[in-house]
Image: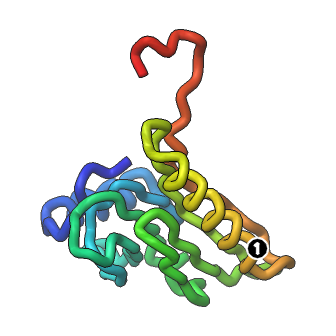
């Protein structure tokens, strides 16, 4: 989770510093809180692609950061919703499709959860069948038997 990437320059700078520090080539982000869709170049040369709400509200949102070297492999990206973003990358032997997803919590209405998982399934169905597929995200999973805290 990334708490509120919004459009804060300092948050984007911190993101770029962490991508460099940890030598990350591909990073999926959730809870970016950025409205709309687009891409932004980070200070370290990485590319930040995001998909947020279309109504201007700064809630939810997903993103994908591609390092300076990997960004050159980007074929295309498709913002599906404020909860799903897909991107295709070219590699030496086979293309790679990456999907970033942010699932609704268990407290959400059943129809919201059903819509999300139908859209997620549809996004995978639309990916080229010969691509390697990678799913990144926050699925709000709760594990363990003690459910008193949730």
Q: Is residue 29 above or below residue 50?
A: above
Residue at 62% of width from left, 57% of height from top? 117
Q: Nearer the viewer, residue 130 or 142?
A: 142
Q: Is residue 133 above or below residue 95?
A: above
Is residue 25 something one can see in this rendering? no
Residue at 64% of width from left, 80% of height from top? 89
Left or right: 48 in relation to 75: left
Q: Nearer the viewer, residue 132 or 51?
A: 51
Left or right: 107 in relation to 117: left
Left or right: 138 in relation to 149: right
Q: Is residue 132 above or below residue 38?
A: above
Q: Where in the figure is residue 42, as x and y percent of width and height?
A: 29, 75
Residue at 40% of width from left, 73% of height from top? 51
Residue at 60% of width from left, 54% of height from top? 114
Left or right: 150 in relation to 32: right
Point out the image quarter for the C terminus.
Answer: top left
Q: Report the residue marked by disc 1.
A: 125
């Amino acid at each position: 989770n990334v708490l509120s990437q919004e459009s804060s320059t300092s948050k984007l700078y911190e993101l770029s510093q962490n991508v460099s520090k940890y030598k990350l080539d591909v990073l999926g982000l959730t809870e970016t809180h950025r409205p709309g869709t687009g891409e932004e170049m980070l200070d370290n040369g990485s590319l930040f692609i995001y998909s947020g709400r279309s109504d201007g509200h700064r809630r939810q949102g997903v993103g994908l950061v591609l390092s300076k070297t990997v960004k050159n492999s980007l074929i295309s990206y498709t913002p599906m919703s404020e909860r799903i973003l897909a991107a295709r990358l070219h590699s030496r032997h086979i293309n790679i499709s990456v999907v970033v997803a942010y699932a609704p919590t268990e407290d959400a209405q059943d129809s919201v959860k059903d819509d999300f998982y139908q859209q997620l399934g549809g996004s995978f169905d639309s990916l080229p069948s010969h691509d390697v597929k990678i799913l990144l995200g926050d699925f709000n999973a709760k594990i363990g038997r003690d459910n008193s805290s949730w």
